[in-house]
């Protein structure tokens, strides 16, 4: 694999693991992504494609898949195309050297002729080499403005899953799962208070939890509503 590619393969988040992902209504999609990581020397029946709005865990699942493959001694590459769209598409050269390629935010490069051509050929090489491909986007394949018919044809054969936003109860459980893995106890009342005052995106909620984790460690205090108000500077609602 080319040195340029290795430098563009983004560092994986430490918390991006399957154990850290609360699926809610997305349990089936999670199961298929995990299965793709366990497959050895075989191409799945179709490219696996997950999509959904921001904050539903697309990037988390792709990075978790890379972590799992690397834990098993394989080679994985995570490419966030929204960050790489200004690069030359030759970053996709030789990706079949990986056991798993994860392409995030593919919508960022569709419509660009050279990127679409490079994606089409990369898909073919991965298939011929028996390697795995996971794709994530903010829209279903049929809703992407793809100009290259061959690429559209490849994506039309993908195994597609929509990731759904978690319910409020599931968001609470997801926060409690993430807290427990940080060694924190997040009581129901504190979690529901966070949900009532914070933005509802899981990205924002997890960032809030990380901030509370640091504050709790520094102050050596448990997570309570009074401490939460103090640590986050949340004033009483008028």
Image (cartoon, rainbow, N blue to C red):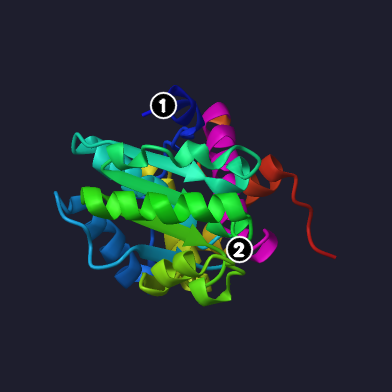
* Front-most of residues 157 and 118: 118
Please give the residue where the numbered disc 1 appears in the rendered image. 2
Residue at the limit of the structure toward the left, as seen here: 41
Q: Where is residue 230 in the image (x, y as percent from the top left)?
A: 70, 43
Q: Which stretch did the figure color magenta?
A: 193-218
Please give the residue where the numbered disc 2 appears in the rendered image. 195
Query: Of tags 1 and 2, which is closer to the observer?
Result: 1
Tell whether label 2 touches label 1 (CB within 8 Å).
no
Label 1, secondary structure: give it: loop
In the figure, is residue 5 to the left or right of 131? Answer: right
Residue 66 belongs to magenta span:
no
Label 2, secondary structure: give it: helix
Q: In which quarter of the image is residue 23?
A: bottom left
Q: Position of residue 211 (x, y in %)?
A: 60, 39
Q: Residue at x 50, y 71 (%)?
A: 141
Q: Residue at x 43, y 72 (%)?
A: 153
In the figure, is residue 141 to the left or right of 76? Answer: right
Q: Position of residue 219 (x, y in %)?
A: 58, 30
Q: Position of residue 47 (x, y in %)?
A: 33, 63
- Mark seen at residue 110: none
Q: Quadrant of residue 127?
A: bottom left
């Amino acid at each position: 694999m080319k040195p340029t590619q290795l430098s563009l393969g983004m560092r994986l988040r430490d918390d991006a693991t399957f154990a850290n992902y609360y699926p809610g209504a997305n349990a089936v999609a999670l199961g298929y992504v995990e299965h793709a990581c366990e497959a050895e020397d075989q191409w799945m029946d179709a490219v696996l494609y997950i999509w959904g709005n921001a904050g539903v865990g697309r990037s988390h699942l792709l990075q978790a898949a890379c972590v799992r493959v690397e834990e098993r001694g394989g080679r994985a590459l995570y490419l966030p195309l929204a960050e790489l769209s200004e690069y030359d598409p030759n970053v996709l050269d030789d990706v079949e050297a990986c056991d798993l390629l994860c392409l995030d935010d593919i919508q960022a490069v569709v419509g660009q002729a050279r990127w679409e051509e490079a994606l089409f050929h990369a898909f073919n090489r991965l298939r011929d080499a028996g390697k795995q491909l996971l794709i994530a986007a903010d829209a279903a394949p049929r809703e992407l403005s793809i100009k290259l018919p061959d690429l559209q044809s490849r994506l039309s054969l993908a195994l597609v899953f929509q990731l759904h936003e978690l319910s409020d109860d599931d968001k609470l459980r997801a926060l409690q799962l993430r807290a427990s893995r940080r060694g924190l106890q997040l009581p129901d009342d504190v979690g529901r208070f966070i949900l009532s005052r914070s933005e509802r995106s899981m990205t924002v909620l997890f960032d809030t939890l990380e901030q509370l984790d640091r504050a709790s460690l520094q102050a050596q205090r448990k997570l309570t509503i009074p401490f939460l108000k103090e640590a986050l500077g949340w004033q009483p609602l008028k």
